[in-house]
Image (cartoon, rainbow, N blue to C red):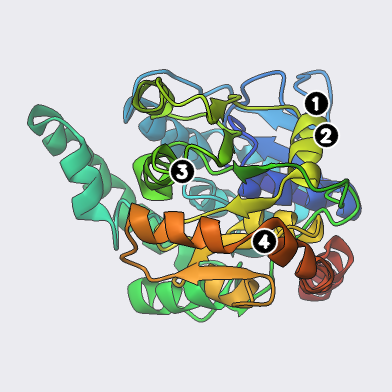
């Protein structure tokens, strides 16, 4: 017989400092919960990285080979997670962790769904088109493998929670399930106003769906405006080449938490124009620091940004020219006038409220 413990949190993996990983780290800290994950790229701010730590389970399923890594993760959460039987309650985060639910049929299972896998559902065609033609059958084969297992696992959850009304609708549409909305926790203690610098800031991961390329193109036509791109990702080299002759555009790569806090705290404004973003933590962190956000009127940003009060929302099919016009209109004086409203709006998403709501769901 297993001796029952309290709560375990499972997250797909820790690679970049993404919002889902941060949410799980906050949960583990405030619930005194143990943590399990497929792999971690160390050093990482959200994990200990020590296999000697009995409160952390690293399945060590990392791989640099696309699709093989995803298959390894899916297989590991199905087959190598018997340890979850020792817990009363398990919280699942990600695409692959729900597959472990078959190991935990005697306890309480809560799925915090950041989104149903978009490469399976609403963005399947986009992901297939991103691959060379010869590799597309491999992705389709993985989709055919994962989709029925994922849907079977979701059906076994006692409760499904999600990060926004936007994703709540997506879950209903593609999975036929009802989900409660608990907004993710914003670090309103460390993202704070430090001053008003002369630069605009982008913090989104550098991949096509985040549309940072459009931000760079806008600032290529704004030589008198400074842009700092504080992130990394698959498009880093491409975007550096695109902006090679633009001294007003600077790339920092991924930064430490403290360095990011300082950049956000001293920015003039933050730009975040991801396509159909699930929720979007970066805009909320920006507002916590009193910084208005130039965003896009779709996805989770419709639930976080108050147009003309805490930022500006572009149409979903915006052009770099429209983005450039929004930057020009968001002058230092106008941005400063939004500071108080930004800080107030960010408190809607503070950590204390998040933990209170999650505790209630676990009772």
Alpha-carbon neighbours of circle 3 within 10 Å: few (<14), some, or many (≥20)?
Answer: some
Q: Secondary structure at mark 2?
A: loop
- Residue 119: x and y in percent read 31, 51
* Alpha carbon separation for disc pair 2 and 4: 21 Å
* Alpha carbon separation for disc pair 3 and 1: 43 Å
Quadrant holding the C terminus: bottom right
Q: Which residue is mark 4?
A: 106
Q: Which residue is mark 2?
A: 55
Which of pointers 2 and 1 indicates the residue nearer the eye?
1
Q: Secondary structure at mark 1?
A: loop
Q: Residue at x 85, y 57 (%)?
A: 188
Decide if residue 164 is in sight here.
Answer: yes
Task: Judge left or right: residue 186 versus residue 40.
Answer: right
Q: Are marks 2 and 1 in contact (CB under 8 Å)?
A: yes
Q: Which residue is mark 1?
A: 48
Q: Report the front residue among 96 and 267.
A: 267
Alpha-carbon neighbours of circle 4 within 10 Å: few (<14), some, or many (≥20)?
Answer: few
* Alpha carbon separation for disc pair 3 and 4: 59 Å
Q: Which picture quadrant has residue 132?
A: top left
- Residue 136: x and y in percent read 14, 37
* Alpha carbon separation for disc pair 3 and 2: 50 Å
Q: Earlier in the sequence, mark 3 or mark 1?
A: 1
* Alpha carbon separation for disc pair 2 and 1: 9 Å
Q: Report the front residue among 279 and 306.
A: 306
């Amino acid at each position: 017989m297993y001796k029952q413990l309290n709560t375990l949190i499972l997250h797909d993996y820790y690679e970049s400092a993404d919002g889902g990983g941060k949410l799980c780290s906050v949960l583990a800290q405030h619930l005194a919960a143990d943590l399990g994950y497929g792999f971690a790229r160390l050093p990482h701010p959200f994990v200990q990285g020590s296999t000697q730590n009995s409160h952390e389970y690293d399945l060590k399923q990392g791989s640099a080979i696309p699709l093989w890594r995803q298959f390894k993760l899916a297989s590991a959460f199905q087959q190598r997670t018997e340890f979850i039987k020792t817990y009363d309650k398990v919280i699942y985060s990600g695409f692959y962790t729900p597959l472990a639910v078959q190991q935990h049929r005697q306890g309480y299972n809560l799925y915090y769904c950041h989104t149903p896998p978009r490469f399976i559902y609403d963005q399947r065609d986009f992901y297939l088109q991103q691959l060379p033609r010869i590799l597309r059958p491999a992705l389709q084969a993985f989709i055919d493998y994962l989709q029925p297992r994922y849907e079977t696992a979701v059906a076994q959850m006692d409760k499904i929670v999600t990060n926004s009304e936007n994703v709540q609708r997506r879950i209903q549409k593609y999975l036929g399930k009802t989900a409660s909305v608990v907004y993710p926790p914003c670090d309103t203690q460390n993202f704070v106003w430090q001053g008003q610098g002369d630069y605009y800031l982008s913090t989104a991961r550098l991949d096509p769906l985040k549309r940072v390329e459009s931000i760079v193109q806008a600032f290529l036509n704004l030589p008198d405006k400074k842009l700092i791109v504080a992130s990394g990702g698959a498009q880093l080299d491409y975007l550096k080449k695109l902006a090679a002759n633009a001294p007003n555009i600077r790339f920092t790569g991924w930064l430490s938490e403290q360095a990011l806090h300082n950049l956000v705290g001293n920015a003039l404004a933050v730009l975040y124009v991801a396509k159909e973003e699930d929720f979007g933590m970066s805009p909320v962190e920006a507002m916590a620091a009193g910084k208005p956000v130039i965003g896009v009127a779709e996805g989770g940003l419709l639930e976080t940004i108050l147009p003309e009060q805490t930022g500006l929302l572009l149409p979903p099919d915006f052009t770099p020219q429209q983005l450039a016009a929004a930057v020009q209109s968001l002058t230092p004086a106008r941005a400063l006038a939004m500071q108080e409203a930004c800080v107030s709006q960010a408190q809607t998403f503070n950590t204390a409220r998040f933990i209170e709501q999650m505790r209630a769901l676990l009772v």
